[in-house]
Image: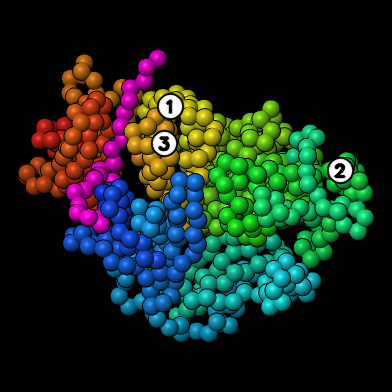
Amino acid sequence: MKTKFILAVSVAACSFVFGQNTPSKVIPGKNGLHADFLRFDKNGPTFQGNPVLLDERSEKLSPGQARKLGLETDKLGFETHRFQQTVNDIPVEYGMMAVQTKDGKIVGQSGKWILKVPSGVEKKSNISESIALQNALNFVGAEQYKWQNKDEEDFIKRETNDRNASFAPKGELVYYSDPTDETLKDLKLAYKFDIYAEKPLSRQYVFVDAKNGKVLGVDAIIHDVNAPGTATTGYSGNRNIVADSYNGSYRLRETGRNGGTSVETYNLKKGTSYASAVDFTDTDNVWNNVNTNKDQYATDAHWGAEMTVDYLYTKFGRKSIDNNHFAIKSYVHYSTNYFNAFWDGSRMTYGDGSSTTNGGKPLTAIDVCGHEITHGMTSKTANLVYQREPGALNEGFSDIFGNSIERWARPTQASWTLGEDFSYVIRDMSNPNAYSQPDTYLGTYWKTATTSGCASPSQANDYCGVHTNSGVLNFWYYLLVTGGSGTNDNGFAYNVSGIGLDKAAAIAYRTLTTYLTSTSNYANTRTYSLQAATDLYGAGSNEVTQVTNAWNAVGVGGGTSPSGLIAASTNESPYAISPNPATDRFTVVFNGKAGKGTVELTNLTGRKELSEKVNLIDGANRVEIQLPANILPGVYIVTVNGQKAGNLIKK
């Protein structure tokens, strides 16, 4: 059956006619913030080591003041430079910009950056670092911390080969604003502490107001498979692994994989101290250590880590999670009856499961290995904050690559579920609803920030649904890989033609590692994934079309129109407007001709409230309009190229 080609034209991302060294595409930021996205298709400015800031009125560019975070180069010849904004030489915690360059020229930028620094921001702390730390520790309230354990302190010195290394937290002054503050207006000078607790286990950044000592917020560093606990086992049959020879035996360590990456797997022997971990050993390098300690599962963790490293290198040329041979260390047999696995910011840790939940099978399945290691890659690239929508994206990308690695490494056992190996499925990317996850943005099972218990993100409420709302990204990816048709929770009838695993993974990877920044949300991810698909496969390609269709299917930036609303020649009106009534945006669907277009909104007195330039194509067009923030509720007239499209009700 032929499907109708629909072009998603984002008015917010419309093309502008600028001169040299000015962008061809701009997505404006929130009030007071720099544009979310810039694109220079031709004659981009020379990259001089900083982001460029665009004054949209004068169309002039100026350098931004920032701290360099990292640099990556991809197969297309693009370099991605990540920066953290500084104000008064103090970093802005969630002010982050990714700058894409090629041949010394800036091609594009994405992220969140303050243009108008709030007046009256503090420049000096009123309390000492020691007082702030005590307040942070009182907030965490742990019985035992890593730095109080001499063995763990010795361990971190050995692991980092730094005799001064310590788990003891040191305060850094930053400007902090809650991640839900979309305009970064509520900046507060704060101490930032990395606090690693041993009992009960937690690791998080804690932000303490440098003026009054109040704890302002947290950002979890430990990223686990599932907040209430997950279960999986890594039975993958007979596999080839690499171990090293040591003292007449062999141990689960490998150095130099893919040119220099170490892969190491250790035995915690049901303890919780990394300092007490020992090597798994074997006398003949034939690892058939099936025993009551379940040591056979250690080779699953080791093989899973090797396959993850190989997948990233084979598919994307990436040298480990930081693209610089970061050592992949896994710790197996953590604690007793521990039904979870987690990335703690430095290493992977796997529990042995629960006797009452999954028969006590260790959580070392390959999709879980890939999931956890991807958390590490995310921390080295986009560094998505672990709460609300950015946290859901963080979890979703880990599911995406955990699943992709499994499908690549053992295709005959692959599925779209997580946890299937031990008959305890916790997520299904092909059907998120089956496990109380949404498949539509803001749809059934979506956990909102106003849900009881989610006003303040914490581990108890899953940091406002990071393992729940990830279902939308999971389903988007499933549709992009395999295709599918149906009707979403908004009544929108969708039809997506799958582009296959490799192309979908390449788009997801480029979106995560090139464009996303710490507070990116679903809307940003749609925009950036379309740009990633354009980079890889060209503007107007089938891949770009299917990325658009898949986002519409899950209700992100489209997919809100009931089925049958796409205008056709048999309709009474050639235009369709939805949703109607609208809250903050609406979509106009119509048939048109290629060229420039204008969409306008006027009130009933004739005053123009909005005028947006758009690019149109021959045939069906789908134009998305962002309503002005200050527009009042009422009835408005929508026109397209001077033709009345209909009335819009603003809630």
Q: How crowded is mark 1: few (under 14 residues within 10 Å), some or many (20 or more)?
A: many
Which residue is labeled 2 in the image?
A: 287
Q: Name the residue under label 1.
A: 496
Above-or-below relation of 70 to 573: below
Of discs 3 and 1, which sits in the foreground?
A: 3
For the residue marked with disc 3, what is the amino acid? Tyr
In whole angstroms, how far apart are the C-alphas of marks 2 and 1? 45 Å
Nearer to me, 398 or 182: 398
Specify the amino acid type for callout 1: Val
> Residue, x 17% and y 38% (percent of image)?
596
Was residue 21 drawn as part of the magenta stretch in this picture? yes
Magenta-drawn segment: 1-22
Q: What element carries label 2?
A: loop
**In this view of the protein, can residue 29 be seen by the observer?**
no
Q: Residue at x 50, y 36 (%)?
A: 504
Residue 400 seen from this side: yes
